[in-house]
Image (cartoon, rainbow, N blue to C red):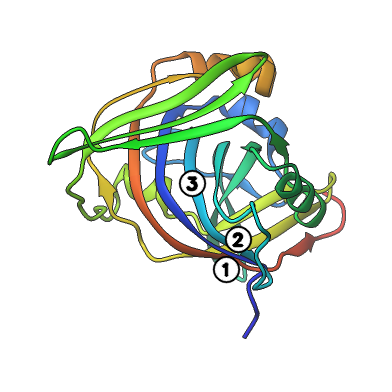
Amino acid sequence: MMRPFLTAAWKKLLMINFEADPAVLRHWLPAHTELDTWNNTHYISLVGFLFENTRVRGFSLPGHRTFEEVNLRFYVRYKESGTWKRGVVFVKELVPKPLITLVANSIYRERYATYEMSHSWQYPDAHSLKVSYRWKVENEWNHLSATALQATQSILPGSEAEFITEHYWGYTQLNAYSTSEYQVTHPQWEIHPVTDFAYHCNACALYGNSLEPMLQQQPLGALLAVGSDIAVMPGKTIRRGTL
């Protein structure tokens, strides 16, 4: 059995979702993949969560086991042997640890960047939960935050929540003809029903002018997943000659 490259726990994944412009997303689309949709809508998501108990090849580094991540991702699929694999493409992934950025960009050719970050989990009463992830861009704090119920519920089959959370493959463009693919394994998550959410993101500074309008519009909604232990498997390269 293949040994995971990375294991960790992903906790309290806050996902703020927006309708995406497919014409803009195609600029970021890796070779051999196509854009995925739910109810004929393309999605792009700002996602914040916490890594815990992080290990690479079974080893952990002091000071690198627990840290925040905030990423911007959209949703794709790839057909292999007649079966669709549903995956995500990361526009950029923010972490507070330079070594994590170096390893991820070197091994998986991802778009990691290092920023000052923090998070807060609060329980103001017996029923509610407040979650916030913060990162500093150009000396200004950006944030994702939500208030939710502590009680959890299962994700309904065929729902928007299932579409957003049930993508188990990552795809990264290597060049015009090649794409990196890796698998992320985890059980299906439960969710905390979100009652309120807010965000502030300097999208132009982080992602450029083309993606800024998507993140300035009214979000479609927010999800807060409980999370679980995860494993990131070693990647492979998809090549099929010229397109």
Q: Which residue is mark 1?
A: 82
Do the CB atoms of the residues marked 1 and 3 lie less than 8 Å apart?
no
Q: Is residue 30 left or right of residue 18?
A: right
Do the CB atoms of the residues marked 1 and 2 lie less than 8 Å apart?
yes
Q: Quadrant of the N terminus?
A: bottom right
Q: Position of residue 128 (x, y in %)?
A: 18, 37
Sort mark 1 into few (<14), some (14-19) or many (20+) by Cα contacts within 10 Å.
few
Q: Give the alpha-carbon distance from disc 2 to disc 3, as whole Å.
A: 31 Å
Q: Which residue is mark 3?
A: 50
Instruction: Give the secondary structure at mark 1.
Output: loop
**Which label's residue is closer to the chain start, 2 or 3?**
3
**Callout 1, which amino acid?**
Gly
Q: Give the alpha-carbon distance from disc 1 to disc 2, as whole Å.
A: 6 Å
Q: Position of residue 130 (x, y in %)?
A: 29, 33
Q: Which mark is residue 243?
A: none
Q: Position of residue 26 (x, y in %)?
A: 67, 33
Q: Is residue 36 above or below residue 41?
A: below
**Callout 2, which amino acid?**
Lys
Q: Position of residue 38 (x, y in %)?
A: 40, 41
Q: Is residue 214 left or right of residue 242?
A: left
Instruction: Give the secondary structure at mark 3.
Output: strand
Q: Which residue is mark 2?
A: 79
Q: Can you tell which of label 1 and label 3 is closer to the viewer? A: 3
Sort mark 2 into few (<14), some (14-19) or many (20+) by Cα contacts within 10 Å.
few
Residue found farthest to the left: 126
Looking at this view, is 156 or 66 the one in front?
Answer: 66
